[in-house]
């Protein structure tokens, strides 16, 4: 049987990023920060009307009433990112039938752990108080790990959890101890070990990298809602996803896990890649199926 391969578009995107972006990653982050500032100057705020005190972006479902509120947590290694920069993601999820709220959170290195986690916990509590109906969760990269940390905090505080969560290429181990970090260092489209360690140090400050709320791969995941987790076979962060999944399953959490060949990190938002549409469609179907399972049988 031949080995499964990714699409030509995925292979091309990976090769391009590996050749032209990966060697200049630190400069790319600086450029993204400048681009983010431009986007925020040109894009008006759209805070949730029912929680205007919470920084973030609100995109109601497009085409029909929303089936649930989806909280989307963006990635960016805790160094770059904002709700307005990722508004295109929220719109895509809104077209899938969700009312989408993307909370802003404070970024490193000016704000270190647990600033980002505190911000998303506050946003979740505000939505929980002001927004009736079910909540689901999605996050990519650092936002995927942050989504898990959020659910752990909510569980420990005795608050209602999201009904399900979708995690894309989640960064869950700021200790950077997964074997894939070294195994895939040359194959990964964007990251090497040095870059990941640098980002982790910026985000953590003096906090231990194995703090379970900073690196949820070390946490007790008992009681978390159903998860769908997608990652790339060739990612340095592949084992961040695989180890999280194994730990969740050992704790009795229902998980759907898939590794995708030849795709770059967090490829779901690269619309020209067929695997992006496929992964998003699977995640949306998973979230909606979990919401449907909650409906009373008539």
Image (cartoon, grey):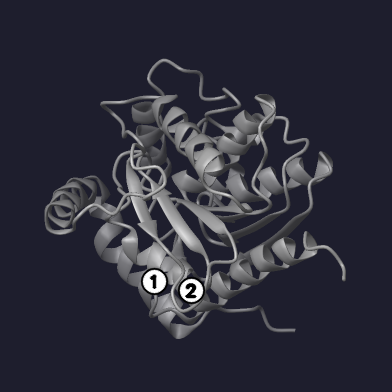
* Nearer the observer, 291 or 287: 291
**Residue 37: horizontal and vertical position, in percent?**
15, 49
**Residue 129: horizontal and vertical position, in percent?**
54, 38
Q: Is residue 74 visible?
A: no
**Residue 108: horizontal and vertical position, in percent?**
31, 31
User: From the image, which quarter does the C terminus lie in?
Assistant: bottom right
Q: Quadrant of residue 103?
A: top left
**Residue 13: horizontal and vertical position, in percent?**
37, 73
| 10 sits to left or right of 97 | left
At 45% from the left edge and 84% from the top edge, which residue is drawn? 8
Tell me the crowding category of disc 1: few under 14, some 14 to 19, or many 20 or more residues within 10 angstroms, Cα based: some
* Nearer the observer, 269 or 264: 269
Q: Which residue is the extreme one toward the right? A: 298
- Marks 2/1: CA–CA distance: 6 Å
| 19 sits to left or right of 37 | right
Q: In this rendering, is residue 137 above or below 65?
A: above
| Helix, strand or loop at mark 2 | helix
| Helix, strand or loop at mark 1 | loop
User: From the image, which quarter does the N terminus lie in?
Assistant: bottom right
* Nearer the observer, 49 or 15: 49
Residue carrying label 2: 276
At 48% from the left edge and 73% from the top edge, which residue is drawn? 276
Residue 270: mark in rendering? 1
| 265 sits to left or right of 22 | right
Q: In this rendering, is residue 290 above or below 249?
A: below
At 48% from the left edge and 37% from the top edge, which residue is drawn? 126
Do the residues bearing badges 2 and 1 touch, measured as CB atoms within 8 Å? yes
Q: Is residue 230 visible?
A: yes
At 41% from the left edge and 67% from the top edge, which residue is drawn? 269
């Amino acid at each position: 049987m031949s080995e499964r391969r990714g699409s030509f578009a995925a292979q091309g995107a990976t090769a391009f990023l590996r050749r032209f972006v990966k060697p200049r990653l630190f400069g790319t982050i600086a450029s993204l920060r400048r681009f983010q500032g431009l986007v925020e100057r040109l894009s008006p705020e759209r805070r949730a009307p029912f929680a205007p005190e919470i920084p973030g972006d609100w995109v109601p479902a497009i085409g029909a009433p929303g089936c649930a509120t989806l909280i989307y947590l963006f990635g960016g290694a805790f160094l770059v990112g904002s709700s307005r920069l990722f508004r295109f993601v929220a719109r895509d999820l809104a077209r899938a039938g969700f009312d989408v709220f993307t909370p802003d959170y404070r970024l490193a290195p000016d704000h270190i752990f647990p600033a980002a986690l505190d911000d998303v916990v506050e946003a979740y509590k505000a939505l929980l108080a002001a927004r009736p109906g079910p909540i689901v969760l999605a996050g990519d990269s650092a936002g995927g790990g942050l989504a898990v940390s959020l659910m752990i905090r909510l569980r420990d505080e005795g608050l209602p959890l999201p009904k399900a969560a979708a995690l894309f290429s989640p960064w869950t181990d700021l200790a950077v101890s997964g074997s894939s970090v070294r195994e895939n260092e040359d194959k990964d489209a964007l990251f090497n070990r040095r870059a990941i360690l640098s980002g982790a140090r910026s985000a953590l400050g003096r906090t231990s990298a194995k703090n379970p709320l900073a690196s949820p791969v070390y946490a007790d995941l008992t009681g978390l809602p159903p998860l769908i987790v997608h990652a790339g076979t060739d990612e340095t962060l592949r084992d961040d996803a695989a180890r999280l999944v194994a730990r969740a399953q050992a704790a009795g959490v229902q998980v759907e896990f898939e590794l995708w060949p030849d795709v770059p990190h967090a490829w779901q938002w690269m619309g020209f890649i067929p695997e992006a549409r496929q992964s998003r469609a699977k995640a949306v179907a998973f979230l909606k199926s979990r919401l449907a399972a909650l409906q009373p049988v008539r």
